[in-house]
Structures are given as structure tokens and as C-alpha cells.
């Protein structure tokens, strides 16, 4: 299955390992709506640790999870804004659509 997420890698100079991290506006928007990680994990139907790992960039979101999130929690935003790398506010859907 194709997984969603724009990411960048950073080399950890102490251990020589690459670390993959997501830059997510999703986390900011969840906080703005007062949605906790526990509530979000229940919405996705995953364990709280799994949701936390996804929001911290340790695990990728599936396409279905991303679409479900955008459709039901954030219909005012598009996927590129919520899950994109440094997405700008002009990539948001207008609030009246």
C-alpha cells in the first residue's frame, strides 16, 4: 500500500544513523481543535502509542488514515497542508467550500 507523507532525512552524527521525520501541520491543527492523541487514536482505530508515533514522524500514515482525517476532522484543509512538508496557508481550502 502506498503511504502518505512528505519527509526529509537527517543524519544523526553521533550514531551515524538516518532519522526520518515528518513536518506535519496536522499536529498543530489537532491541538487547535483540542483533540488529544488519545482521542485521535480512537478515531483512527489504532493504539495511542501508534498514533503518537505517527504524529512524531516515526511511523507513516496510510492513505486511508490521511483521507479519513482530512474528510471528517479537517474538511476545511487539504491533504497537502495537513500532511505536507512546510505547506503554506495558501494550500488550505477556503473555509466556505
Image (spheres, rainbow, N blue to C red):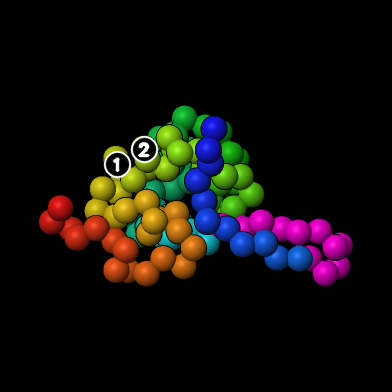
Residue 51 appears in view: no
Residue lying at 71% horizontally and 58% vertically, measured from the top left: 19
Residue 37 appears in view: yes
- Above or below 69: residue 14: below
Residue 73's spot in the image, x, y percent?
31, 44
Is 94 a magenta residue?
no
Q: Secondary structure at mark 2?
A: helix
Residue lying at 64% horizontally and 49% vertically, measured from the top left: 58
Occupied quadrant, residue 84: bottom left
Pointer 2 residue: 68
Occupied quadrant, residue 49: top right
82 sits to left or right of 54: left
Q: Main secondary structure of the magenta part?
A: strand
- Indicate which disc residue 53 carries: none
13 sits to left or right of 35: right
Instruction: Mark 1: give few (<14), some (14-19) or many (20+) Cα within 10 Å.
Output: some
Residue 36's spot in the image, x, y percent?
44, 48
Residue lying at 57% horizontally and 45% vertically, measured from the top left: 60
Give the residue furthest to the right: 15
Is 16 a magenta residue?
yes
Residues marked 2 and 1 touching at CB (< 8 Å) = yes
27 sits to left or right of 73: right
Pointer 1 residue: 71
Give the residue furthest to the left: 96
Residue 56's spot in the image, x, y percent?
58, 53
- Which region shows up in magenta? 12-22
Amino acid at each position: 500500500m502506498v503511504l502518505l507523507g512528505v519527509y526529509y532525512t537527517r543524519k544523526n552524527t553521533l550514531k551515524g544513523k538516518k532519522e526520518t521525520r515528518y513536518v506535519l501541520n496536522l499536529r498543530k491543527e489537532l491541538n487547535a481543535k483540542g483533540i488529544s492523541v488519545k482521542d485521535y487514536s480512537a478515531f483512527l482505530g489504532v493504539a495511542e502509542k501508534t498514533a503518537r508515533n505517527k504524529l512524531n514522524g516515526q511511523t507513516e500514515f496510510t492513505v486511508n488514515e490521511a483521507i479519513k482525517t482530512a474528510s471528517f476532522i479537517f474538511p476545511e484543509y487539504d491533504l497537502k497542508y495537513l500532511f505536507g512538508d512546510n505547506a503554506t496557508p495558501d494550500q488550505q481550502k477556503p473555509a466556505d467550500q
